[in-house]
């Protein structure tokens, strides 16, 4: 494979706006840990022969919460009790510097591919009717696990392709039940202007590998109230059935909480006495507990890796009228939320538990990214040879770190895209912003000079160092411009896929 590739299969990297003030400072160099990618001259994307499962391969249950604030759990200072989540944290590792993408679709893409979403054309949430989803060419975590002999299933929110051909059963899942688009679709038919002649009625879908997914009932406000409960019911049933098999299993459970429209299961309506958001927090904790109980009850807890994270930080949303018309979750000490480049939008709760393997009661502020799950899980199950070698992989293997065999993470930087823009780069404890937005629906601001903050002493990103200290931190542009320059170089060699494009692969 040549170092350069024709630009016609994907989008040109020139469409991405790189911060020129930094790129002019560095012209070459090796990629940093945070921008690591893999490429080779091997033909084909990966060995896709199916392996007989190893007896020590863990079952994997990944629980993904929607719009989850860093401090929306009591173990991280939240005011609403979340005892089952706290219990999970005490039994595993709690990652306080877990980094996601800025919206729902990009984070799901990062988890499933180990690639920066902009490479896959999944860098933003697409509107209804727009081209969307992962190209079939992408090799997902579910495909890797399936090729390793796992039984795979998804329950709940997918949001990585709304049309048949780009649904979970087309991307490595043996079966799925859930919604193909955003959680907010439940509210479409409740709007008085809704016209089914011009916009599709949202549905709950089911699908099996090798068949076309099909809608089974409307996804509306009434369905949304019970959606997370039913997702957990079906996931628990899958766990019970697969526990009787010799094959390991992978269950991905995508909650719709804490995303508008804000409704809860009737059992939780008013339970907190503190409003609908707090009721939703209680329901999340309850549902996490039910999944943990299902794993325990069938006797597979000792060999099951449970991962619990959010997809992005809390949003700022209206929920009605009167004094409680506005609601938002808690990002704790961090500034910002959903769709911003601040830490409050990019750090979510993150816990991983695997008894006897991941040390219990461990808390780490080392940098970990949603991008890292694919290579990390591949190494943990002995499937690292299946990581694709014909495309950039931005995730890094964190298996030794998770297992407690090393103190430090293998990552020291993250790059935050909002759409096509690089909003910010975090390197160690230093964070540089090129564009900012204060809240979910705030206007985007550009700046004469990049803004830089020291997150270790200023988690709220309030004291801008260049202005406060007269540019004595200008040296930070050296490692950060290096990260950006190398990323630009790799995108020139491997052009990004356009949203919705049927990408055939690199030549």
Image (cartoon, rainbow, N blue to C red):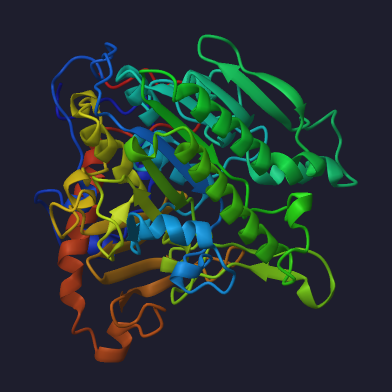
Q: Is residue 162 left or right of residue 494?
A: right
* Residue 129 image point, x, y percent: 67, 32
Q: Is residue 64 left or right of residue 8?
A: right
Q: Quadrant of the N terminus?
A: top left
**Considering depth in this image, is 18 or 479 the residue closer to the camera?**
479
In this view, the residue farthest toward the right is 192
Q: Is residue 280 above or below residue 291?
A: below
Residue 476, image quadrant: bottom left
Q: Is residue 166 left or right of residue 258?
A: left
* Residue 332 image point, x, y percent: 48, 74
In this view, the residue farthest toward the left is 29
Residue 478, image quadrant: bottom left
Q: Quadrant of the C terminus?
A: top left
**Considering depth in this image, is 251 or 444 the residue closer to the camera?**
251
Residue ID at (23%, 45%): 357
* Residue 50 image point, x, y percent: 29, 12
* Residue 421 image point, x, y percent: 41, 54
Q: Is residue 507 above or below residue 339?
A: above
Residue ID at (36%, 30%): 141
**Considering depth in this image, is 422 or 134 the residue closer to the camera?**
134
* Total marks placed: 0
Residue 58 visible within the image: yes
């Amino acid at each position: 494979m040549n170092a350069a590739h024709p630009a016609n299969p994907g989008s040109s990297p020139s469409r991405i706006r790189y911060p020129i003030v930094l790129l002019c400072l560095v012209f070459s160099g090796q990629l940093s840990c945070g921008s690591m990618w893999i490429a080779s001259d091997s033909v084909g994307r990966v060995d896709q022969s199916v392996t007989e499962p190893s007896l020590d391969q863990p079952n994997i249950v990944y629980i993904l919460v929607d719009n989850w604030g860093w401090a929306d759990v009591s173990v991280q200072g939240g005011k609403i009790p979340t005892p089952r989540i706290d219990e999970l944290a005490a039994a595993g590792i709690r990652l306080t510097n877990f980094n996601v993408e800025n919206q729902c679709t990009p984070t799901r893409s990062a988890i499933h591919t180990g690639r920066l979403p902009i490479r896959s054309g999944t860098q933003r949430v697409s509107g209804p009717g727009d081209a969307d989803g992962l190209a079939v060419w992408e090799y997902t975590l579910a495909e890797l696990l399936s090729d390793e002999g796992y039984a795979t299933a998804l329950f709940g929110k997918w949001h990585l392709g709304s049309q048949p051909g780009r649904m979970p059963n087309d991307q490595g899942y043996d079966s799925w039940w859930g919604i193909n688009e955003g959680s907010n679709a439940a509210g479409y038919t409740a709007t008085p202007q809704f016209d089914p002649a011009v916009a599709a009625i949202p549905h709950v879908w089911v699908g099996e590998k090798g068949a076309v997914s099909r809608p089974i009932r409307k996804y509306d406000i009434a369905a949304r109230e019970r959606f997370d409960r039913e997702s957990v019911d079906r996931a628990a049933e899958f766990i019970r059935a697969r526990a009787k098999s010799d094959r390991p299993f992978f269950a991905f459970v995508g909650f719709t909480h804490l995303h508008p429209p804000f409704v809860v299961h009737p059992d939780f309506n008013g339970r907190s006495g503190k409003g609908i958001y707090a009721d939703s927090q209680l329901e999340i904790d309850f549902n996490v507990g039910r999944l943990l109980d299902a794993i325990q009850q069938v006797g597979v807890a000792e060999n099951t890796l449970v991962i619990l994270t959010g997809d992005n930080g809390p949003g700022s949303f209206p929920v009605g009228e009167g004094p409680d018309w506005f609601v938002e979750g808690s990002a704790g000490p961090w500034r910002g939320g959903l769709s911003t480049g601040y830490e409050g939008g990019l750090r979510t709760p993150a816990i991983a538990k695997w008894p006897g393997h991941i040390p219990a009661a461990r808390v780490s502020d080392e940098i970990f990214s949603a991008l890292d799950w694919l290579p990390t899980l591949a190494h943990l199950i002995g499937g690292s040879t299946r990581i694709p070698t014909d495309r950039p992989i931005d995730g890094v293997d964190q298996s030794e770190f998770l297992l407690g065999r090393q103190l430090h993470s293998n990552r020291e930087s993250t790059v935050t895209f909002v759409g096509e823009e690089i909003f910010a780069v975090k390197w160690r404890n230093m964070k540089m912003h090129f564009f900012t937005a204060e809240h979910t629906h705030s206007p985007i601001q550009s700046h004469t000079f990049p803004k830089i903050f020291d997150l270790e002493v200023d988690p709220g990103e309030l004291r801008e160092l260049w202005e406060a200290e007269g540019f004595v931190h200008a040296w930070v542009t050296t490692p950060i411009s290096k990260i950006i320059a190398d990323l630009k170089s790799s995108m020139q060699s491997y052009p990004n896929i356009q949203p919705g494009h049927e990408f055939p692969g690199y030549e």
